Amino acid sequence: MRYALEIAYDGRPFNGWQKQPGRKTVQGTLEEALSRLEGTDVHVTGAGRTDAGVHARGQVASFDLSKSWEIERLLRALENNLPPEIGVIRAAKASENFHARHSAIWREYAYFLWTASHCYPQVRPFVWRVRPGWDSPDLVLACKALEGEHDFALFCPQSECPPNSVRRVLRAGFVRRRDWIAFRIRATGFLFHMVRNIVQDLRSIAEGKLSLDAFRLSLKGRGGQRSNRGMAPASGLFLWKIGYSPSPWE
Amino acid sequence: MRYALEIAYDGRPFNGWQKQPGRKTVQGTLEEALSRLEGTDVHVTGAGRTDAGVHARGQVASFDLSKSWEIERLLRALENNLPPEIGVIRAAKASENFHARHSAIWREYAYFLWTASHCYPQVRPFVWRVRPGWDSPDLVLACKALEGEHDFALFCPQSECPPNSVRRVLRAGFVRRRDWIAFRIRATGFLFHMVRNIVQDLRSIAEGKLSLDAFRLSLKGRGGQRSNRGMAPASGLFLWKIGYSPSPWE
């Protein structure tokens, strides 16, 4: 029987999603918990391979179990077998050919920027603190520039960049509240470090250190230009939501 | 020079507010940081003595420093000298007779209840999880019953109960959002464990295990009745706001 899980996690204690021998990872922790329920090794596939320290609100995982579990019982059994840093949001029996990664039609990330001069300790591990009043009309234009198909080769470390580095951004924009701003970006796929490199550039734009034209030029792939501008920290980044059609949750 | 600080903290790593030899407390940590700035011992007074594990969003502390600090500089110096579990929200020079505890005219606590069946790991340390759909029309009536002057002796462990256990509740009520409910209570003062005992009773009322009449009877002090009904955990409780007149922040 194939199952789908939507999970949230606090990325701090994990060396990212992907299983690595001798290191605590989300995939490894999830596989251990499911293997205890199954009595034998269970392999888990994730929709997105989040990096060390990156959080998730809506990561999706798929896996097979030999018996048919009542969903409420599976949720309780997982809650009892997972550390408090991983929460299971929902679970469902999925069709045989559902695959958390290959079936995904889009992924959405959220990046939280904290704009007040003070910050609450409950919030601090999940945001990047920026200058109070952080804002710029250019940010809206930068988001517009991101939408559509671009070669994001310059937003990925060279050693990690796949031969085809073109990705389609379906939407990019900001949500503003009193003390924080969330940058949300939805795309067919993401390259390694892509969101954190984009957020770094957006910060440079808002602070007047990077022009919109220079940013647009860096979206032209290897033919464009993007000098080393650093990278936003993992703390503010959340894998927010994965899109499927049909949805495994309905 | 007398100063006032508004501070927020994550209560988990602390053995409460009050200084205790050999244990990590909020008051002790704050005094250490201020003493480093001052070069000699600084004593700090807090508006409320929060218990082990209880959080704060708006605790207020007062203390004296020998020199006159520019407020922005003091904020930065404190941020560099405090652990990430304590955040300074604002600071001000206060009048000579300002006293964080004695000058307070009211205190407000918030208690967060989580009402969805799933829970995010980022939220879990700051809420008490209750049954999904948790609600009851009696909760509004219980809040009404709380308002006014009552003898709260039965909401405090006997060994900790002062001779005068009458307190005036200025307002009590619920704020509801999609997945959580906050209980807010403002009073001239609180007894030890008072809010957590009240929240335990509100939960019992919502779950039909305690009648409104029995709850009202327990507000009559030592002449009333309140059998041992347990206590809500520290995780959901925040010291939310302290009221002063005049306010030290204006």
Image: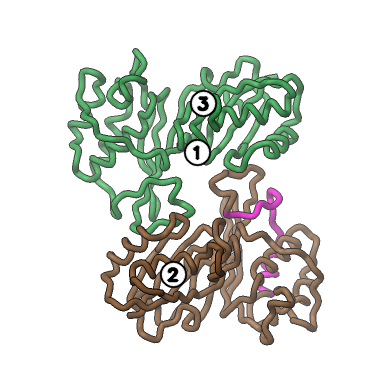
Chain colours: A brown, B green
In front of the other: A157 or B101: A157
Query: Mark 3 — residue?
Result: B18
Quadrant of res B79: top right
* Circle 2 residues within 10 Å: few <14, some 14–19, many ≥20: some
Q: CA distance from mark 2 to mark 3?
A: 43 Å
Query: Mark 2 — residue?
Result: A31
Residue A141 located within the stretch drawn in magenta = yes
- Chain for numbered disc 2: A
State the SS at label 1.
loop
Give the vertical position of B92 relative to B84 (above or below): above
Could you say which disc has been placed on residue B153 in the image? none
Which region of the structure is painted magenta? A126-145
Q: CA distance from mark 1 to mark 2?
A: 32 Å
Residue B21 located within the stretch drawn in magenta = no
Quadrant of res A229: bottom right
Residue for point 61% across, 26% down: B248
- Chain for numbered disc 1: B
Give the quarter of the figure containing the N terminus of chain B. Answer: top right
State the SS at label 3.
loop
Give the vertical position of A117 relative to B227 (above or below): below
Query: Mark 1 — residue?
Result: B11
Which label lies toward us, 2 or 3? 2
- Chain for numbered disc 3: B
Question: What type is the residue that disc 1 sits on?
Answer: Gly
Question: What type is the residue that disc 3 sits on?
Answer: Gln
Q: CA distance from mark 3 to mark 1?
A: 12 Å
State the SS at label 2.
helix
Which label lies toward us, 1 or 2? 2
